[in-house]
């Protein structure tokens, strides 16, 4: 079977769009319907444990601290995030999740796990192994593309690092 590059490109775009749409609809219909996907990902980047600085969180999301400030303002008003000045250095702003923020982040992680489980469900163990190798190959290629476009001064974490960090936090929390 000959693979058409245009067909592959169209399929990859549809997968990306459908994952985003599924995530959006899941959030809108769930208990945390007042959150956007971007806000949910911000909660994930903050994490359920130690308070993080605004600059650390912005870097992990690949956004400016100014953009993050707007999002944090909304999340504080909604009751998902607490913002405090560092006691030792008042210039540093630390953010952490409220109880509600931790629950939202945990539920979001479970959504991703359920999605993956349902995608893998119909396949045999051997097919799952092949699929995981292929998906990892695609992930590594795309990660390399992201790094290619990032400038050398950027301290932004890759999507894989953020996902791994979020998964570890969700597994431990």
Image: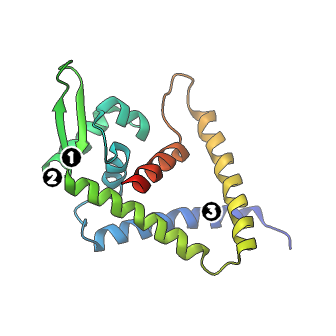
> Counting other residues with Cα less than 10 Å from the Cα at mark 1, is it few (<14), some (14-19), or many (20 or more)?
many
The picture places residue 138, in percent across and down from the top left corner, at 68, 54
Q: Are the residues flagged by discs 2 and 3 in contact, CB closer than 8 Å? A: no
Pointer 1 or 3: first along the chain: 3
The picture places residue 54, in percent across and down from the top left corner, at 29, 32
Residue holding disc 3: 12
Q: Secondary structure at mark 3?
A: helix
> Counting other residues with Cα less than 10 Å from the Cα at mark 3, is it few (<14), some (14-19), or many (20 or more)?
few
Question: Where's the N terminus, which quadrant?
Answer: bottom right
Which is more foreground, mark 1 or mark 3? 1
> Counting other residues with Cα less than 10 Å from the Cα at mark 2, is it few (<14), some (14-19), or many (20 or more)?
few
Q: Secondary structure at mark 1?
A: strand
Looking at this rendering, what residue extends furthest in the bottom direction? 122
Residue 92: quadrant of the picture: top left
The picture places residue 98, in percent across and down from the top left corner, at 20, 50
Q: Residue at x 35, y 57 (%)?
A: 37
Q: Residue at x 24, y 54 (%)?
A: 101
Q: Residue at x 54, y 76 (%)?
A: 118
Residue holding disc 1: 81
Residue 51: mark in rendering: none
Along the line of sight, which residue is nearer the eye, 19 or 133?
A: 133
The picture places residue 14, in percent across and down from the top left corner, at 57, 67
Question: Where's the C terminus, which quadrant?
Answer: bottom left
Q: CA distance from mark 2 to mark 3?
A: 36 Å
Residue 150: quadrant of the picture: top right
Pointer 2 or 3: first along the chain: 3
Q: Residue at x 24, y 70 (%)?
A: 31
Q: Horizontal placement of 80 versus 145: left or right?
A: left
Residue holding disc 2: 79
């Amino acid at each position: 079977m000959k693979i058409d590059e245009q067909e592959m490109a169209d399929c990859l775009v549809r997968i990306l769009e459908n994952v985003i749409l599924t995530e959006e609809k899941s959030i809108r219909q769930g208990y945390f319907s007042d959150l956007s996907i971007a806000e949910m990902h911000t909660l994930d980047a903050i994490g359920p444990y130690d308070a993080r600085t605004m600059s650390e969180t912005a870097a992990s999301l690949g956004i400016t601290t100014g953009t993050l400030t707007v999002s944090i303002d909304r999340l504080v008003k909604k009751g998902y995030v607490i913002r405090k000045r560092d006691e030792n250095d008042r210039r540093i702003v630390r953010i952490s999740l409220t109880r509600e923020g931790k629950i939202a982040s945990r539920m979001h992680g479970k959504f991703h796990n359920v999605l993956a489980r349902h995608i893998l469900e119909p396949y045999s163990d051997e097919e799952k192994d092949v699929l995981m190798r292929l998906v990892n190959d695609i992930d590594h290629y795309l990660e390399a593309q992201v790094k290619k476009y990032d400038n050398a001064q950027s301290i932004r974490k890759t999507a894989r690092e953020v996902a791994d960090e979020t998964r570890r936090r969700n597994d431990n929390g």
